[in-house]
Image: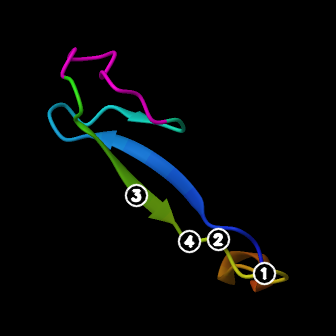
Amino acid sequence: MTKDKVAYVCNECGYDSSKWMGRCPACQSWNSMVEFKIPARAVGGKSASANATATA
């Protein structure tokens, strides 16, 4: 099982970062970065498009 990724998004302007910051570099708002967990994809899974076959 893979580890979930984390993103930090500013509540004021929507700026996102992979690291937490005390002050948003886009809108200069203090303590506005909120953590969001991004679930990891299943290991070995294939998308529907990868399984589709082309017909001509």
> Within 10 angstroms of label 4, few (less than 14), some, or many (20 or more) residues?
few
Q: Which residue is mark 1?
A: 1
What distance separates the C-alpha of mark 1 from that of mark 4?
11 Å
- State the SS at label 2: loop
Q: Is residue 40 visible in the rendered structure shown here?
A: yes
* Residue 39: mark in rendering: 4
Say if 51 sits above or below 38 in the image: below
Residue at the spot of label 3: 36
Q: Earlier in the sequence, mark 1 or mark 3?
A: 1
Q: Is residue 28 magenta?
A: yes
Q: Which residues are magenta?
A: 20-29
Q: Which residue is mark 2?
A: 40
Identify the amino acid type marked 3.
Phe
Asked if the residue at tag 3 contacts the one at tag 4, i.e. Cβ–Cβ closer than 8 Å, the answer is no
Q: CA distance from mark 4 to mark 2?
A: 4 Å
Q: Principal SS element in the magenta part? A: loop
- Tag 4 near tag 2, CB within 8 Å: yes
Residue type (three-letter) at the residue carrying disc 1: Met
Asked which secondary structure carries label 1, the reply is loop
Rate crowding at label 3 as few (under 14), some (14 to 19) or many (20 or more) other CA atoms within 10 Å: few
Placement of 32 over or under 50, stated as above or below: above
Give me the residue at 67% from left, 83% from top.
48
Residue at 72% x, 82% y is 42
- The quarter in which the N terminus is drawn is bottom right
Instruction: Give amino acid for label 4.
Output: Pro
Report the Cα–Cα distance between label 1 and label 2: 8 Å
